[in-house]
Amino acid sequence: RDPPATYSRQAAYQPQQRAPSMYANRGPVARNVAPPSTVPINALNPYNVRWTIKARVTSKGELRRYSNQRGDGKVFNFDLLDAEGGEIRVTCFNAVADQFFDQIV
């Protein structure tokens, strides 16, 4: 028969040493507050999720009321022109029309 094994307490328990985590909380994190880069109107497409354009208003329509099968509402539109000559028409409905009609000049 083999003699019983003896272990010292120190050898039996040793906490695992881990490399410091890259995600450890090491204080406040600075946000990226760089201004968003602008996208030319001609570069917009349905797959762009977040974008910012810089343009001037070239024309603004009247605030009109409409009635259809889904109910009553309000609508107005305006045209924008950017520095590269790209143009786009913006159409606002209901609450958005109320919010922006007086702000768009």
Image (cartoon, grey):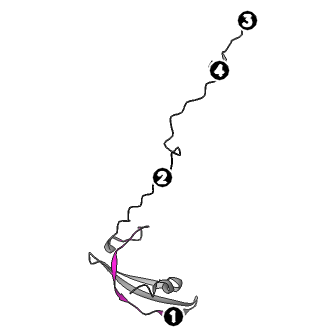
Q: Is residue 59 magenta?
A: yes
Judged by depth in the image, the label closer to the viewer, 1 or 2, is 2
Q: Earlier in the sequence, mark 2 or mark 3?
A: 3
Judged by depth in the image, the label closer to the viewer, 3 or 4, is 4
Q: Quadrant of residue 9?
A: top right
Q: Is residue 35 above or below residue 17?
A: below
The location of residue 59, given as percent across then percent down, is 35, 88
Question: Element under label 2?
Answer: loop
**Is 76 on the left-hand or right-hand side of 11?**
left
Q: Earlier in the sequence, mark 3 or mark 4?
A: 3
Question: Element under label 3?
Answer: loop
Q: Quadrant of residue 4?
A: top right
* Residue located 42% across and 58% down the image: 32
Question: Element under label 4?
Answer: helix
For the magenta stretch, what is the residue range? 44-66
Residue where numbered disc 1 is placed: 65
The location of residue 42, given as percent across then percent down, is 31, 73
* Residue located 38% across and 70% down the image: 52
Q: Is residue 9 above or below residue 51?
A: above
Judged by depth in the image, the label closer to the viewer, 1 or 4, is 4
The location of residue 8, given as percent across then percent down, is 66, 15
Residue where numbered disc 4 is placed: 12
- The disc placed on residue 1 is 3
Tell me the crowding category of disc 4: few under 14, some 14 to 19, or many 20 or more residues within 10 angstroms, Cα based: few
Residue furthest front as drawn: 27
Please, what is the three-letter code of the amino acid marked with disc 2?
Answer: Val
Tell me the crowding category of disc 2: few under 14, some 14 to 19, or many 20 or more residues within 10 angstroms, Cα based: few
Q: Are marks 3 and 4 in contact (CB under 8 Å)?
A: no
